[in-house]
Image (tube, rainbow, N blue to C red):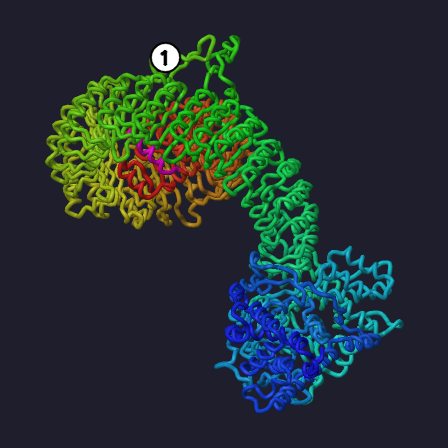
Amino acid sequence: MQPPFQNDDLDMEAAVASARPQLVEFLSHHLGWLLTTSRHFLPGMALNGLDGITDHREKASVLLDLLEKAGPATWKQFAQYLCMECDLPLDLEILLISSAGEGFAGRRRHRSSSVSDKDVKQQRLDSAEKYRHLLIDSMRQRYGSRRAAGAAAQEQTQPLAFSQAFVNLVIRHSKASHLKERMDKPRQDVAGAPEPEECADTAVKVSDLFCSVVPSGTTKVIFLFGKPGTGKTMLMHRICQKWAEGVLPQFLFTFLFEFRQLNLLKRKLTLKELLFDLFLQPEDSPDAVFQNLLENAWRTLIIFDGLDEFAANMDLSSSSKGGPTLTSHMSISELFVDLCHGKLLPGCTVLVTSRPKRLPNFLLNTVEFLLAEIWGFDHEKVEEYVSHYFHQYSFKEQAIAHLKNNTKLLSMCLIPALCYVVCVCLEYLLLKHQRSVELPQTMTQFYIKMLLIFINKQQGEHADGEATQLNCNKKAILGLCDLALKGLEDKKLVFYVGDIPEHVKEFASLHGLLTVFEVKTSGTCPEAGYAFVHLSLQEFFAALCLMVSRRVDKNYLKKKFSLKSKWTLKNEAKTEFMESFHIFLSGLSSKECRTFLMLLAEQDEAWVQDKQDTILQSLKKLAATHLTGPKVIELCHCTFETQDLKVAQHIGSLLNFKYEFKNFRLTPLDMSALVFVINSGQDLTYLDFAGCLMDIDSLEVLSGCNNIEHLSFRSRRCGDDFASALSKSLRGMGSLKKLELTGGSITAEGMTNLVQASSQCLQLEEINLQDNRIRDPEVKRVMDLFSRMEKLKKIDLSNNDLSLNAVLILAKEVIACQNAAELRVRKDTVMIYFSGPSGKVPRSLDLRWEERKEHVIPTRRVKLCLQDRSLSSQHAKEIVAILQSCPCLSEVDLSGNKLGDEGCSCLLESLPWIPISKQLDLSQNCLSVNGICSLLKSVNTCQKMMEVQVSLCHETAVLRFTENGEFASLPPREEPVFSPDDQQYGEENQTPTASKKIRLTDSHFQASDLEKLYAVLKECSSISELDLSNNYLGDKGLLQLFQFLPNLKMLSSLKLNDNQISLNSVFFLAQSLSTLEHIKRMNLSLGHRQVVHLTFWERIRVRSTSRWRSSFLAHPKHVAAGRCFRLRDCRVGPEDVTRLCQILAQCPQLTEIDLSGNSLSDQSIERLLSFLPYLCHLTLLSIRNNTFSPRCTALLINSINLCGRIRMVEVRSSENAFLHLGASVRSQKTSCRLTDCAIGQGQIDELCRVLEQRGWLAEVDLSRNQLGDEGLRCFLDRLHRVPVTCSLNLSHNRISQDGVLHLINAFATSGNTAEVQVSLCSKATLIIKLTSRDDPRKILRLAECNFQPEHLEKLCLLLEKCTGLTEYISSNNNVTVQAAERLLHSLRKNLGLLKMSIEEPWVCKESVTNLLELAVQACGNITEITICKDKTLFQLGVRFPHCLEKVESAVSRLNLYKPEIKHACFYQRVREKCAQLQELRWSHVELHNDEAEMLVKILLPLPELKKFGLTSSSIMPTGIDYLIMGLQNCQAIEELNLGHMKLSGAAVPKLVLALCEMPSLKRLILNHNSIGNDGCSRLTEALRNMHYLEEINLSHNKIGDPGLMNLAAVLLKMQNLKRIDLSGNSPSPAGGEKLMGALACCQRIEELLLSRNVFGDRTAVELALRLPHMTNLKILHLQNNNIGPAGGMKLTRALVVCGLLEEISLSENDLGEGSIHALSEGLPRFEHLRKIDLKLCGITDDASKSLSHGFRQCPSMEEIILSWNALGDGGARELAGALPGMEKLKMLDLEKNRIGACGATKLAEQLAKCPEIQFIRLWDNPVSKGLAEKLTSQDPRVCFS
């Protein structure tokens, strides 16, 4: 293009054409001026069409066209006017002057003469054009053809590292909006990671980058980022070259700056200095050139290369303050920021390159810029590059083929820099070894190989080996390494001559490792600068320096290998130039690099390996930390570089099984590294790619990954091409089970291709194609492919805008597909489920124990769900056809559609021919009452239907069917279903139809609707449950319903809740108890929520001879079980109660009446009680939540005199009353319980008058009332009038010490008071037991009465009068030692035994001697001394009358052992008082020498001593031996207890000697010692001769098989043994089996205690075999014995032979359901069973029914422990139902189960019927605190604490 100033001769047309583009651009920004001006030159009509043009450029262009067409004269006038009015750019003004002609001269404003003005402008333009040509020449010299020629010449003498031939790069346009959210996030959101839906991800050409339109005067910023080696710098050079060749004509000026050189500047510059001093100075007139450049800013391109290499900070603070001026001196960062902001050179184009990690904040927040990424090469570009590289070689094709066949190498070559390195190595190897080529495996190894090749090339053909060459150049290489490391540490990438040693410079320059260039830091002469040809090369040599330098130890190496600082944005400043540094360090730690490092470092292998191990250990540690997706990829690269499979396996195992990658780009090289780590691991992994940029080439890499179990892609970029590429890789993923491609753009075609490929992956279980664009898939073909995938379980096609037609076709094909199990469609949700590997549904796990049959569910069950798809009545026939085509439907859901009455009726008419086995849902289908009638009619037409659930208000309509094949869908017909021969099978095989349930609720029917419904219901004779709740039936509707109720002969439940009935209906319903005798229970409530629930007895059905016809017995089948009437929350007056009772009195078999919450008045209750004699079968009358007055309470108590059948009257809190009645009059004792009823002194007289009338009272409970001392006195005064009362409970009645003393006085003088128990602590117990028989017992128990001295004195005086006392127990009553002595003197009786117990804290502090001194103070002869210091218990047994020396022989024998004189008197006293001692028990005492001596010499030899126990006590070191020797004198001993005495096996031989002297021994107790096997074996020597032994206790003695087997040999002959305890030892199953065999010979055994022995199933089975020989067994403990289902089953079945069992403990054994069922079946055989412990046995609700049934048949059961199991509400309900049948049950433990509100409430309800139960434990069950408190307040026996 010629300069404009040479165009003086151009004609006007040429001049206008030349100036037009620039003129349009200028005028588009002055459009208002142009329109106004044009009106002066053009007619008005010509401007009319401009209003519709909105684009400013287009409008300016049209106006110029009009001005040109107006003629040359008009144009010249316009051009002259434009030049005068506007300040145009110089070159544009000159062009316009040329087009206007010379006539224009002299007429411009502001100019003195045209000639001088034109000359000035011409001069400025001339200087600018000359500078432009100077720039072009400079660019050509640096980057153009001349440089290329020079480089080619240079190539003959030296290699040029990274001097790549240019091949166009792959560049993709991105969007920056996502990056604005990046700043404080991890690298996962780094630059280069646009959001998946925002990123256009479109390929662009270089020229396209400059084509975007921006407003005039606006600076355009282009930001190019790319990973290291992708060719960013090379591309910038290419752009400069092409500009110099005229390819980018839009730019007049182009400047290129490298940040690594700008780092060298320390001073501030102006913009002019930056452009001219640092790049290129004009030859002349720099000011004119700069002015021209300013005027043409929009045609100026400034390139900044390598922003990531800039050492200074770059942010908003770098921008100049207050607006820059052209003369302002600024830093480089300030200049750069202001250029980007348009504050300097506004309108110019700024092109910036960087690695991905660095994107300045100001670009994100304040500048609109174009963002693009350089991806490097694709496969096509690689082939082009390699072809160019090897163009002169004959083996070019071989080289290309070699790369294509190696996926890893091909992935490396996608990075241009690595592609060059690979080509260098490949060239070298092919030249030497054309047939076999082995290339390095990693990037590090390639760099090493490249270095060696460069050195080798310089040596030529006569080169020595690599080791020799390396040694020759070692010094230079190490110097280069030092230079590289120091540069990175100092953030220095450009070096001056003085920075580099001469030999290093020569070596590096010779081998093309350093490049030299001019460095300008000012306008002075430039200096020579050196830099590594690529930053990656500097990183390689820096990493090499660390590995070979002797100065670098392991700690320093660890510090430098800190990948976290590499990956943490806040620490970027530390490692800004180390993008690949850690990767090279990892690569150098590989075994393959060890020899190279040894040669270079001149060290042995151990030294090098030590450094390498440091890196490997750091990698391993890093894998154990939390890593984001990009960090995982970096770690995989490092691991890949090591090529160490063990390290890779370790790291793969530490990384989570799930790899999540979100919103960043993954290259094929990244994928190769990732696959290497995954394949090295042993575990299957989950790969999740969300919004990640990814080459299709990357998918090919994945094909070799065998350990992927779950693969997921989420991105809109995933279209058909992506799916096609992925399809090719699927076959290689041998472990893939789940594939997800969601949120993409896959169409039906892409889906078909993908499924076709997936069908070859036989292990695939799930495919998710959610949220794509699959609108009309090829359903038939796709389902055919799915049918071939045997393990397929699920397909998800949701959110794909499938049409209704496509959905219906899909339904047809799913039914036709044999392995399809379910189609679930709801709005946009579309999922298909398949039956899995076997193609069969698993056998049902919900089999009841009673029905353990080999029942296999048919091979296929299909669920079809078509919800919310706008299906209307016109689709009904098509739906019917689809449903009829499938013979194995289980569930069909058509809810949320628009079928209406018509569509549903069509469907229901065909229902008998549609084989649905479970459920049909027609909810939300616009049904009316007519539609509901159609539903109900289908109950009769479709025999397999078992339930209809309908609600008009909730738009619910659900039909459920029976799965029993007996009711297969058949058309109605009259002929018999069975032939006459079938009658022989009996009635149980002849069920004609399934029972039906109809729930027709919440529909608010009108009267006319009821007639229609009742007409239909009347025909439904097979209904078993009918629910018409919340339908506004009213009294009239209820009456109409009961008219046809007798027709419903199978009805078992009727619910009519919330139907607005009145009290009249209550009377009507009560009357129906008489008219409808099969009503079992009636539950009514007229409270806030009305309840009407009737349950019916099952009635016996008799089959006719020919057809299914049923006739019913006139009476219920279970009539003897009784009936129940409940009326709650209904205000009824006395007259209403009278009317109700009159009705109920006519009801046969009415056993329970509950009138809770009805606010009954005193008069109402009085009338109710008056009817009790007429309610002949009543067993329970409950009145809860009804406030009772004192008079009312008296009425309730007096009921025992009105009705002789009453067994208990219980009134709680004056609100809850329960009357329990027996079957006959006066057959049992009667109890009265009035607890917490505020009874005080004033009510005593009336109460006693009532009680006096009743002669046979078993219990009176007045606890928690307000008697006080006076009330108690009054009650005691009248007590003698009350006939025989066994128990009187006055606890919690505010009794004081004075009241207690008054009670004791009455106790002492009363002849019928057998026992008094008092405690004044928090328990506040006061219980009196009376008897009319001649009971010799007279017991007084006093606990925590806090007696003062005056009280104790009165107590002693009272006790002196009580000469008939048999037992006195005092516990913590402030009785001192002196008071105790006084008590012992006071306690006496005329004849017989008296037992005295004192528990006080001083007992544990006194010595044994002192306690014995206290003992001898007692009157009478001592027969028992018990000291338990752990319980602070001192107990004596004394016999009256007192006898002095009865046994003279004993005294004479005792005289043989005369103690010292000082103890003579005391010892003599002990001899006298204890001459008749029979029991001596000491526990937790500390025996000193004199006490031990007294025990051995005085007490043990006593002739009548029968029982001796010394447990948990300490004695002098030789005391045990001394004691055992003393035991040899106990010849009359019958019981010996040495438990917890730390006896070892060494003490046993001496004990054996003592035992041999005890021929009468019956009980030997040695528990919790350390006897062991040897001791047990020695002990058997003594046991052999103990023929009278009845009990052996060796529990917790560490006895194993040897000891147990010796014991078993002795047991064979122990015919009198009744109890054996071997719990807590350590035998094996073999020892257990031996023991069980021996125990079978002990036929009198009654108690077998073997807990905590881990015997296992073998021993349990052996015991089961031996149990028939143990017919006297009463107690069996096998807790925690590792008994499983097998042993448990045998054992529980065998237990039935032990009919005398009273207690069973099988807790803490995993027995299994089968064992529990077997035990349940045997429970009825245990008539004497009192306690059963099944804690922690894994019992669930499934076993509860049979278990409860068994408990109910145990007549003696008192305690049941089922804690720590898995019982839920179902189990609780079963147990609750059994409670009333267990009359002796006292405690039920259900702690730590899964019982919720429903189960707990049911237990509490049934507890009201069980007055004998003391408590039910429910601690730690999932019951809310509020409900727990409520239930406990209603009945304190329900315990949650």
| Quadrant where the C terminus is found in the figure | top left
- Location of residue 815 by image quarter: top right
Question: What residue is rendered at 69% in x and 81% in y?
Answer: 7
Q: Is residue 560 left or right of residue 948?
A: right
| Quadrant where the N terminus is found in the figure | bottom right
Residue corresponding to mark 1:
1113
Q: Is residue 1219 left or right of residue 140?
A: left
In the image, residue 1806 lies in the stretch drawn in magenta: yes
Q: Is residue 1537 above or below residue 108?
A: above
Q: Magenta region's main secondary structure?
A: helix
Of 1643 and 1330, nearer the camera is 1330
From the top left corner, tell me how far across and down residue 1608 is, in percent: 53, 31
Q: Is residue 1019 above or below residue 1469?
A: above
Question: What residue is rendered at 85% in x and 74% in y?
Answer: 459
Write the start and end of the magenta stretch as one range.
Answer: 1795-1808
- Location of residue 608 by image quarter: bottom right
Q: Is residue 1305 left or right of residue 17?
A: left
Q: Secondary structure at mark 1?
A: loop
Q: Amino acid at mark 1?
A: Leu
Question: What residue is rendered at 37% in x and 25% in y?
Answer: 1026
Residue 817 seen from this side = yes
Of 656 and 38, nearer the camera is 38
